[in-house]
Amino acid sequence: MPHVSVLAGAAGERARLAARCGIILPRCRAGRTARRQRDPPPAGRVALSPGPPSEDTMSSTLRYLSDADVRELMPPMAEVVELVEQTLGHHGRGDTQMPPKVDLAPGGDAFVHAMPALVTPTGALGCKWISGYPQNKAKSLPYINGSLLMNDVETGVPIGMLDASHITAVRTAACAAVTAKHLADPASEVITLIGCGVQARQVIEALLAVFPDTERMLAYDIDPEQQARFADEVMTTFDLASIIPPEPQEACEGAHIIVSSIPIVHEPEAFIEPDWLQTGTLCIPLDFDAAFTPAAYQRAELFVTDDAAQFSRYRERGYFKDIPDPSAELGAIVAGSGPVRPEGAPIVMSANLGLGLLDVALGQQLLQRAGAQSVGRELPL
């Protein structure tokens, strides 16, 4: 290993050579890497990505956004809903690349997924690494944890690492709202949420962005204290009448839109029966087959999923037993090439399994905001 004086001499010689050649070398403080500041995009124009750095300015850094940073930078829910709708439209037109999730089963009902995706028209490229551990509640830890790695679409260089927990909750809720926009009765006024956790809080906000005239919400959870806290929060935050029935059947009867978001398990004890659902109800299970029984799925006149290949992959893994194949993809419906909501449909079902496309689309927006507002930390690669 060279003596430190040799290294110092080499650095000095580099500086003297640069001075003779008219080159200005970056000055770096210990522990930090110099970086070039980029101007935010002009008003009315959305940058597709931070762009590939030139050889003389490449800094080999990425921007890290913590959970607090992500929450600070998150656009209003109405804007996220619009972004998700646009991204689903790209997916429906075939302008995306997204293989089914790579899934691992570390034990019990826990899961870990890798979710790579590319939205070609916008250049949003990345991969989310996300886990779900139902047993975390007993340890006072979040059920969902994850990270999102974003890459420059022209060079492949990593440009961002973002905490993905809040991103997952927000984009999932926004996708439910887009689903309701296209498949629910436009006159829907009663919303039921099955499961009153983190996801439900985002879902009600997203649905209210699409159905602002909602009259009341019914919420059910197996934990009565959590159920009561959630209802109080909704009433306080959104000034919406909130009812907490003691049984799930009471929560479902009379609802126009039902969204379930309980933990995903390998051997579900589904409990929502078809005779609990009134004619015209839109059901949006965010929890695979954990809440709605196969008979409830079978009653749907129109059965939609957000990605058919992914649905088939999960069926191969043992989920969705005795449940028919979906007849349409949500993206095609958004793009205008899929079926429309049948008039007088008894039940419409949309199994939203989660799309990495939505993660990278939102991650791109957050990185653009972070660059414009100098939020986050630049980390050396």
Image (tube, rainbow, N blue to C red):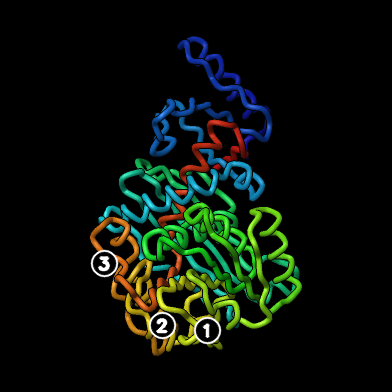
- List x then y, in percent, for residue 93: 25, 55
Give the crowd class for mark 2: few <14, some 14-19, many >=20 residues within 10 Å: many
Q: Nearer the viewer, residue 195 or 318?
A: 195
Give the crowd class for mark 3: few <14, some 14-19, many >=20 residues within 10 Å: some
- Badge 3 is on which residue? 339
Q: Amino acid at mark 3?
A: Pro
Q: Residue at x 62, y 26 (%)?
A: 28
Earlier sequence position, callout 3 versus callout 2 = 2
- Mark number displayed over residue 143: none
- Badge 1 is on which residue? 272
Earlier sequence position, callout 1 versus callout 3 = 1
Earlier sequence position, callout 1 versus callout 2 = 1
Please, is residue 204 above or below residue 264 in the view?
Answer: above
Please, is residue 379 above or below residue 89 in the view?
Answer: above
Find out whether the residues at labels 1 and 2 contact each other: C-beta distance under 8 Å: no
- Mark number displayed over residue 297: 2
